[in-house]
Image (spheres, rainbow, N blue to C red):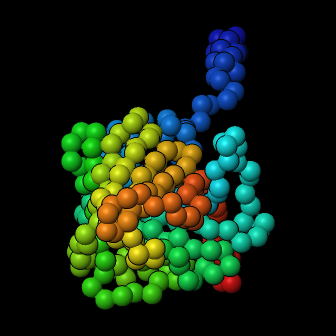
């Protein structure tokens, strides 16, 4: 009996030792596999839009220098989901700000994603009935954000972007031509979303003759970065 127990113990230890030392890790939001595993295209686009993106200038070499929050003033785009997908559908709130002025956003938007066909989705833009003044610490707090922005009380505005699936982890979108009040002209945006970046290209047009205008715009390459919530809270208290 003792011999049998010893033999069983030996095989048990041997079987444990044969397990792979490094269990394969799940892909992160920075890898295509993460989005491939999501299944539905609307879910993939929704997740691609979420996260923290840092503005960079795109160089001819396509090389990007690493970025740290402590290295000075930078522009951050913080995209978070609104509501609950099961109840409200696919929504995103965008809050773009400079790290030196976290509570004075450069740009905010409320977006809803809808399926148009299997590989084509449209993003509709909304506004609140009354203007709201959200601070960064309120955007970070999901409960506060959803209390201040209720999806069933929003007003649809005349802005839409149509996205087409390039791959399971990349979508390219084009906006309608609309008025740019800052430059007093017309504009059309192209959006390229992938696990690595959120690229925005803009074409400007003259209001009168529709000719293309060469105007300077803000940095148009937003790189996906892992910025800890603790760091965002620290920025919010500046």
Query: Residue at the spot x=26%, y=77% of the render?
Result: 154
Residue 162 or residue 183, whichever sits in front: 183
Left of 191 or right of it: where is 164? left
Residue 190: x and y in percent read 42, 52
Which percent across, then down, holds residue 235? 66, 76
Q: Which residue lies furthest to the front in this view?
A: 209
- In the rendered image, which quarter is residue 13 located in? top right
Residue 84 visible? The answer is no
- For the N terminus, the image quarter is top right
Looking at the image, residue 36 lies above or below residue 177: above
The quadrant holding residue 188 is: bottom left
Q: Which residue shows up at 33% across the image and 43% down it?
A: 164
Report the quarter where the C terminus lies: bottom right
Task: Residue 231 in the image: state x and y as whole percent.
Answer: 68, 69
85, above or below 70, in the image: above
Q: In this view, does 202 lie above or below 129?
A: above
Out of 231 and 11, give the one closest to the viewer.
231
As rendered, which of 130 and 18 lies closer to the eye?
130
The residue that appears at 35% across and 52% down in the rendered structure is 174
On the image, which quarter does residue 101 sit in? bottom right
Judge whether residue 19 can be spotted in this image.
yes
Q: Is residue 144 left or right of residue 60?
A: left
In this image, 208 relative to 107: left or right?
Answer: left
- Residue shown at the point (39%, 87%) measured from the top left: 132
Looking at the picture, how far across and down is residue 68, in whole percent?
74, 61
The mark tally for this picture is: 0
């Amino acid at each position: 009996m003792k011999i049998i127990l010893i033999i069983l113990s030996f095989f048990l230890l041997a079987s444990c030792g044969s397990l792979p030392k490094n269990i394969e890790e799940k892909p992160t939001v920075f890898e295509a596999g993460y989005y491939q595993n999501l299944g539905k295209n609307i879910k993939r686009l929704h997740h691609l839009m979420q996260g923290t993106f840092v503005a960079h200038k795109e160089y001819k070499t396509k090389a990007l220098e690493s970025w740290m929050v402590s290295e000075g003033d930078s522009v951050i785009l913080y995209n978070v989901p609104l509501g609950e997908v099961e109840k409200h559908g696919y929504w995103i709130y965008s809050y773009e700000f400079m790290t030196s002025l976290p509570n004075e956003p450069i740009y905010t938007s409320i977006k809803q994603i809808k399926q148009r066909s299997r590989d084509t989705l449209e993003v509709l833009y909304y506004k609140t009935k009354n203007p709201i003044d959200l601070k960064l610490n309120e955007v970070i707090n999901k409960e506060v954000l959803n209390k201040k922005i209720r999806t069933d009380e929003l007003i649809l505005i005349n802005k839409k972007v149509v996205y087409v699936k390039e791959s399971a982890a990349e979508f390219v979108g084009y906006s309608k031509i609309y008025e740019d009040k800052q430059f007093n002209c017309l504009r059309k945006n192209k959006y390229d979303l992938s696990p690595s970046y959120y690229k925005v290209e803009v074409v400007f047009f003259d209001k009168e003759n529709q000719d293309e205008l060469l105007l300077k715009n803000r940095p148009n390459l937003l790189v996906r970065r892992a910025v800890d919530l603790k760091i965002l809270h620290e920025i919010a208290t500046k």
